[in-house]
Each structure stands twice: as structure tokens, then as C-alpha cells.
Image (spheres, rainbow, N blue to C red):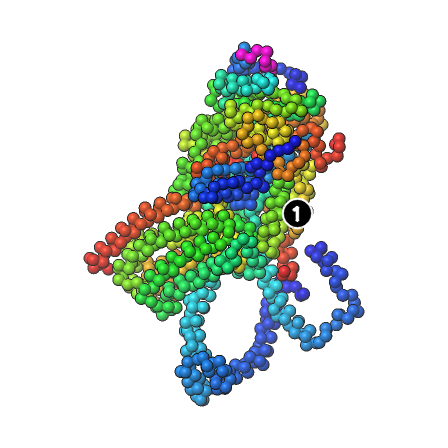
Amino acid sequence: MSGAQAKQEPSPRAHELVNSLNSTFGQMVSVTVLRPNRIRVQTDRANLRALATFARDMLHFDHCTNVSGTDFPKDKQIQIDYHLGSIDGEDLRSVILGLTCRVPSDDAKLPSLIEIFPSVDLHERETYEMLGVTFEGHPELARLLLPEDWSDIPPMLKAYRLPGRLEGE
Amino acid sequence: MVAQELEEAPKKPGPGSKSDGPGLNILVGKARQVIQEAIVDPVTYLANWGRLYSLWPVHLETACCSIEWGAVSGPRFDAERYGILEAFGSLRQCDLIVVHGTVTRKMAPRLRWIYDQMPEPKWVIAMGACSITGGVYFDSYNVLPGVDQLVPVDVYVPGCPPRPEELIDAFVLLQDKIRKSNIR
Amino acid sequence: MAELVTFEQFVVRILKIVFWILIILPLIILPIFYLAYVLPVEFVCGFNALTCSTHINWAFAINMFNPEQMDPFSSTSMLSQMGLGASGVLFKSSTFPGLTFAAVLSSFVIWYERKLLAKMQYRVGPLYAGRVGGIFQSFADLFKLLFKEIVIPAKADALMFLAPPFAMMALSGALLAIIPIGSTTYIAQSPYSLLIAIAILSFFPMVTLLAGWASNNKFSFIGAIRALYQMISYEIPLLLSVLGVVILTRSLNLSVIAESQTKIWYIAPMILGAVVFYLTAMAELERIPFDLPEADSELVAGWLTEYTSMVFGVLNLAVYIKLYALSALFTILFLGGWLGPPGLPDFVWFLIKTAIVLTIFIIPRGFSPRIRIDQLIGFGWLWLVGLTFVNIFIAFMLSASGLL
Amino acid sequence: MSMPLASSGLQTAQVAEDKLVVSIGPQHPGAGHFRFTITVDGDTIVDVAPDPGYVHRGAEKQTEYRTYLQSIPMLERSSLTDVTNIIGPYSLAAEELMGIEIPPRGQYLRMIMSENQRIMSHLYWLGIQGIFLGHSTMFMWPLGDRDIFVDLGQMIGGARITYSYWIPGGVRNDMPESFKPRALKVFDYFETRLKDYERIFFQNPLFLKRTEDVGVLRREDAIKLGVVGPVLRGSDVKSDTRIDEPYCFYKDLDFEVPSYKECDTYARCMVHLVEMRQSMRIIRQCLEKMPLGPVRVKLSPQQRTNPGEAYARVEAARGAMSFHIISDGSTKPYRVRISVPSMRNLIVLKKLLIGSHVADMPAIYWSLDYWPVEADK
């Protein structure tokens, strides 16, 4: 989807990050610059943990601001985005590094990043219940926001239609 | 009120029926009237007068209308003028639930439990469009389309969120309703 | 049913009742009264003849044959002799200066507190209940609570649950009974009345604990335990703070203590004792900043959580009567009791002083947050007990040097 | 698929006999629309289980059924104390996808409204913090002063609190001319009031006793756990989106970001106080520098966006508020993900409460500025 968006020139600090990511991971990741300070790194679930560890230890991204999941029923995939931010990294406060990972819908499993970034805790739980994506290694993957008696499919899946709306509205 | 009147309507004797007269004995009828006028009515008046000036609301915030509730109890609007005292944490001492907006499916059983635990008599004000019909969340998967399926509502206050003046108007309406009611 | 909707209708109805009473009274009640008191007691009321002591019977007999006192209303003097008249014990303890007076005063104190607090917060406070400034607000609360359902929690012990309000009321009343409010206006006199008052105060934590335990609620229980901690650790400074006054007067009688302050009120030499008494009384009364047992942001309503309707009302009323009693105690101990310029009856001076003390008790609610339990207990044992010892030392010095 | 029910409301935990499990909320004066279970050993909290979700209304799902403009009134109700700032990042992200530029006057009006909203939110926060500490006057005074700022917002936005003002393409309408003198008068008044607050509430010895060294969140923990806003700044981190990644014209303005080394509840309270002053300073500068001109770019109600994704954030009253929008080029967003500061701050509740006194629970809980309606979305 993001391919259609016009690519922009990264800021100097972001440029260094892109270079360092490319030189370390090479073909395993595809790095896109969405805006001068928004870098998007696409990878697969096998490399996600290594990439996150690298982002924390080498690139000084110290916390996760957001985890979002998107359902793509046409591709039968679910896309998980981790948005990483930095407080202590030099000149990095304006940069958001997005780690993107796509998993197939029928096998929605992903290694949890909670050991690397403790701040993903509640975001991962929310993504788990909203999209049914299992984060392996998360200590307390339980219901968070939905009522206790929720028995439908996870609501953020595109297959779930809102009850208050007619079909196709 | 309308519902009550409808329920009572068939019980009213029609014109010309036997119970239309003064009863079996004029003395008993007079005594009944004296008791009614001397004891029952003043007691009713006192109870209703006490109730309408002493409505203590439960501290139950279901959603975002609680901000305007805060404004109502604040200095500018000051609900305490009407005897509405928001100082009691325990629902055992309260008489009024103000449903502050949206009631979600997770909150709904709690709201009902709270209503059931309160001592009689008790009143409910549905504040905000969400608690009346669901409001902007009418199509949400987790929102009740109105709380009147859950608890009997006495006064509806539309608005999203209602202005504090509207809520005060609701209090006055509720007081009017209590003034005209019989003691249970 | 005819519906009353306005105040005017209510007044008309009340006048109607008065009319009916005026009709019924001379027709039915007065003849019975006349029969009961003018005719010989032995014939009319066997119960009186059996139970009343002989001298009352003799008094009846004297009355009966005394042509000047033949009218039935003169027999009110009989009531006085039995302790039921305007100067009798029953009248004193039940009406003035006893429970009724204290209860009415307390309900006005509740209104006054809410008004004062509202003024401090740029609000109006109660306004519409009663025609003038919502002055009948607490009566509205009272009538509402009277006609409310009483809920007893399913797993609570009903007897134990209902006992504390009445025990609390009885204790507050007992506290009232021992406090004189004028040189002749008192309910009971005792040479040890100060000691008795403090002994009664030490009963309150038990009642609180009973209430919290019988409610079978976690919040109630935590609140009751907190109240127990608080009251027991503040009892010792309370006792020590009044010791200075006792040393100066060499008496435990509250009347004597009040009368002995003709030269100087004890608040001047015993300022430390007065401060400690004030703080400990605040803690005993569970008022902000010491209202931990009822802290509503932590424990829903503390040990009052499960109490409903008039049961709650009685508890609340008892607490306010206790507030009045402790302010009265403060007035007697440190402000010279009923001593004041002549012109007004002495109990009026006493009540004026008590009202000022009450205001000082109420005001901290407007400007103070709540303190924490560990800080509270530390403060009590470290500072208050220390200050009372300084106070006792000052009292000894003054007493030994003969200044007071 | 099945989901376990652990830590949900209907299960009771097994604990030792001498410990007490107390459920706080949702009907509890110290919890609001939120529930958590604490396990108490004596006067110490040994375990905390937060149970949010009582106000989960599915705003994210509903955006899929609404066009970009239709979503705004619904989204802003998620955070009614802070309506301008929750719409901010949404509009920024949508504009990025639409590729439009906003006229400068619109940008300045956005800043004015956003800062006014910040003051309102902080005053509300201050009031509730007061009542949680048992200080009823500290509840009433800020709530009374909040109404003055509500009036200011009403002059521009038209409604009392929900004005859907910051929309994609600019702002909804221009401000009236009477706003500037009125605002300056209000600020002069409120500055004296802030001095009163500082003297009466913040220097009150009992307030100090209740907040100092209570709920200490160290700098490294704050960064690691990803907290935002006043909580982060109270933990000795001078981080603010308005400076880190300036949006609108914040880089042209002169203001300070407070931070405190004490890392306790009192530091968080002080951050709120200082930020209110700085917000007034910002609005004064905005009123000086504001150019004339249009305030919005006309957009069609059925405005389409370029396909792609955008991640935008602003500094809301409670901290960095960010929106992640994925668009497939149609009139409705494909996916809107809201990352709210309240949700990000909730993670430290467990850390701060364990080991503290029961009585400190309300003070710590509300010092995190956790607004359940916002967190649950």
C-alpha cells in the first residue's frame, strides 16, 4: 500500500539510520522513508526480534509508542506495526521508526517484543484481543478492553461488521 | 408518570357504580377522610419535601459526561443549592443515579447491580445522548442503545454532553415529579 | 389521595389538624385526665396505687383535699416531683440541655457547616430547602432518611449491625449528660465528671469496630481498623492534655473547673494543652484532616459504608452531637465555660463560646487535605505526647509558684 | 477462537489468608470509570490488577464506516477534557495523506485552541487530585476557574466543550474580534489565581506530606516504560512533542518545558501548574503574532486521500497523542489506530502502587492523569 506514496528525502539523522539498517540487515529488511522523520522497516516475523534488539542497542530507540494491527483480507494477511521512539538517543526525539511485519491470517503468531521494549505490554494485549494475533512470549496475554462475555470474532478484523450498520453501508 | 396513570386507569370505577357513594357507613367514611387529611397527607408531604430537597447522587461515572457533572457540582452551577450533595461515596446512602453518558456492555451489569443495591426509593437520570439512544456510538459493537432497557429512567437529558443548565433543569423536573408522587 | 404540592396547602392542612385536636381534646382527653387526677388515685388507677411510693400518694391526697389546687393543671407540680417536670431529670436529659436540644443544634450545625464550606469555595450551598438560605436542609435530609428503606447486608449479623447506631447515640447522650452548660443548667453532677467524660470517649472505638465488623464489608472493616488505631493512639494525648487543667484546679469536676477560671481563662497558660486537645478532638471526631476512617477516595465511606437510611442518619447525628459535646468540653476546660459579662443568662455565654469553637472545628475541612495513617500515628505519639508533657510541666510550675 | 478470562472482572483470585483483596471501582469515589483490584497486606499494597475497558466504545472500528470529516465528532468524545488535542494528530495525519497545506492563521488558531484546552484539562486534573486527597476546596476552585476557560473556548468554538474545531484543512471558523481583549483579561486574572493555588494548595504542609516521595518513578524506568506527558516530565525528562517535533508554529514561539528531578507525585503536580502558565504565555504570543488571512482550505465532504500511511503526533494535555492512519485511497480511512497517552501511562500504575500505602493509592493513580474514557477509546 505504501508504495504509492511519494518517497521523500530523509533528514540527515534519519539518513544515517537508514544506512545503518541497510548495511546490517541487507536484504532481510526493506527500508522506506515516508517523511523526513518517519522510517518504515518491513521485515518478516523471524527477523523481528533481531531487528528490535538492534534498534534498541545500536540505534538507541528506547521505547515503543504504539502497536497497531491492520487486517488485509484480500492478501489474507495481518500487518503489525511497532512504532519506536527515542528519548535518550541523540537527535532522535523527532524520529519514529516503524517496524512492520506481516503475518498470515490463519497463522497469526508473532514473537512478542515485551522483553526488548517493556512498553509494548498493553498495546500487544489490545492488538491480541482486537485482531486475534498471538504474541508468543507475552506473560499475560489476556482480555483487556472487551467485555468478559465477548464471544464474537475479534472486532477489528474486516470480516466483523458493526451490528448497528446495514450490510454495505 | 404516564405509565403509572395508564396502569391505574382500569381500576378507576366508572360513573354509576356502587363504590361511587360515601361507602358503607358515613361515619367510617368521615373517619377515613379525617385520617387521610390529618395523618396521611401531611406525612406524604413531609416525606416528599424531604426527598426532593435531599437527592444524593451515586458516584458512578459511566463515560465522558462526568466532566459536565463536575461542572454542575462546581462553583458556577453549584448543584448543592438544590440539596444535591455529592459527598457520599457509598451507594447505600444515595437516592439518585445520574447515568453519565455511554453505557458499555461491560459497564451494563455493574450499573444494574448498583441500581439493585440502592435502597428504595431511588431515581435515575439519563444524561447525554449516549444514555438515551447510544448517541454517536449508535453503531458501536460495545455500546448499549439507551439505558432504559436496563434501569427505569425518570428524566432524560439530551445533549452531547448536555450543558450544566440542562442538567439542573432535569433536577428541577425530577423534584417536580417527586413532589407529585405518593410515598411508597 | 389528595396531593399536597405547595407549602401553603401544607400550612392549611396543619391548621386543620390543630383544629381537630382542639375539638377532640376537651371532649375526650380532658375528662380522662380529670378522672385520673382529681378523683382519688387508689380508685382510678390501681397501677399508681401499687407502684408509686407512699409520699407521692400522700401528695396526691394533699392536693386532692386542698381547695386551692383543685384544678387538674396544678398537678404538673406532681410531675416535677416525679422528675418529669420542667426542672426534672427526665426533662433535662431529654429536652434541654439534653438530647433534643443537642440534636436540633446538630442539625443546624450540619447546615452551618455546609454553608460555611460553600462560602469558602465560592459557592452558595443549600439554598432552596426552607425559605431562608436553605436553613431546613438538614431537616430535609432527616425526613428523607426517615422514609427510606433499611438495607441489612445479606451476610451481616443483623443485631450487631443495628446495635452500633444506638450505642453511638447512647454514648453521645451520656457525654452530653456529664457536661454542664451553666452554673445551674446541668443534667448530672459528679465530682469526677471530667474522668467520666474521658471514659465515655474511650468507648467510641469499640462501637466503631463493631459497626465495621458487623457490616461484613472490606471497606467497612479497613475503616474500622483505622478508626481503632486512630482513636486509641489519640486517647493518650487527649488525657494528658487535660491533665494540666486538672493540676491547676485540683479538681475533676467540670463545674468547678469552669468556675475557677474567673481570674484568667486557661487557654492563656495552657495554650499547648488547648492545641493538643483541639487536634486530638479532631481525630476523635474523624474530621478532615483526620477523617481516615471515612476517607471516601480510598475506602468508599469507611465504616459507614453499609449503613442506610435512618440508621445512617442516627450514626451521623451521633457524630455531630459528639462534635458539639467536645466543643462544649473545650469551652469548659479552656475558655472559662459560662463565665462572661452579666446581662445574659450564663448558658447563652456558654453557647456563644461553643459556637466559636465549633466553627474552629469545622473550618479545617475547607483548607486541608487528608493525612495518612502512618503520619497520623507518628504525629500523635511523637509530637502531641511530647507537647502535653511540656504542658504538664508548665502547669506544675504555675501551680507550685502559686501564680494560679 | 477462545480467549482466557484471567484478570477480568468475574474471577476471584486465590490469595493467602492474611491478605485482603479489595476491588476498587467502577463504583468507587476514587476510581471513576475504571476498576482495579488491589491485594493488601496490612497497610501495604502487594499486588495490583488493572481492569480497564468500562468505556471501550470501539471508536477505531467506527472510523471505518465514516468519512474523514464524519469521524471527528465521534473521535473527540474519546477525550472530552481535551477535545482539540485528540483531533490534532488525526487531522495532521489526514492532511499528510491528502497533501494539503494549512494557512498560517489556521495554524495559529489551532495553537490557541490547543493551549486553551490544555489549561482546561489541567484544571480539571487539579480539581480531581484535590478531592482524591480529601481537599474539597482544591476541587471547587479549579473547577470554577475552568469554566472561565470554557467560556473562552466557547467564544471561538461555539459549544461548551465539544466544538470539533481542529479539522483536516484548517480550523472550522475564525475567531471573533472580542476574543483577544477578553482572553488577556482572563489571563491576568488567572495568573493571580495561580499564585493563590501555589500558596494555598501546593505549599500546604499536609499536601506536601501526602505527595512528596510518593509514587517515585525514576528517569530510566519512565523512559523504558514509554510514559508520556506530565508523568515523563515529572520524572526528570525534558521531552515535549511541541519542541521535539514542532507542529504548527511552535518552533517560532518562546516557552519553557518544565521537568523535575524529584520524580514523585509532587513533581507531577508542579509540572501541571507550570504548564498552565506556559500555555497562557503561548496564547499571548499567538495573539500577538497572528497574521490575517483564511483559516481553512476548502475540502469536499467526500475528500479522497492518497493511498499510504501516516503517523502523526501532537502534545496533548496528558502527553504525546499519536494517530496511525492507513488509507487505501477511498473516502474512508482503511485503519485508524489511536495511541493515547492515558493508555501509555497506565503501564506504570502497577509499578508505582506495589509497595505503597493504601492511602497513597488515589494520589498516585490520579497523578498519572489516567483518563479511562480516553484510554479505552
Q: Which residue lies furthest to the right in this view?
A: B16
Considering only vertical position in the picture, is D231 above or below C214?
above
Rendered location of residue D149, percent (x, y): 54, 39
Quarter the C terminus of chain D occupies = top right
Residue B1 at least partly seen: yes
Residue type beneath disc 1: Leu
Q: Mark 1 points at which residue?
A: B150
Q: Is A30 part of what is drawn in magenta?
A: yes
Looking at the picture, tell me which residue is in the foreground, A155 or B15.
Answer: A155
Considering only vertical position in the picture, is C110 above or below C79?
above
Residue D80 at least partly seen: no
Looking at the picture, tell me which residue is in the foreground, D352 or C358.
Answer: D352
Lateral position of residue D190 relative to residue D170, left or right: left
Quarter the N terminus of chain D occupies = top right
Q: Which residue is drawn at 75% across and 30% down?
A: A168
Q: Residue furthest left?
A: C401
The total number of labels drawn is 1
Highlighted magenta segment, given as a residue range: A24-34
Rendered location of residue C107, percent (x, y): 48, 60
Specify the subunit that label 1 lies on.
B
Looking at the picture, tell me which residue is in the foreground, B95 or D187.
Answer: B95
The quadrant where residue D291 appears: top right
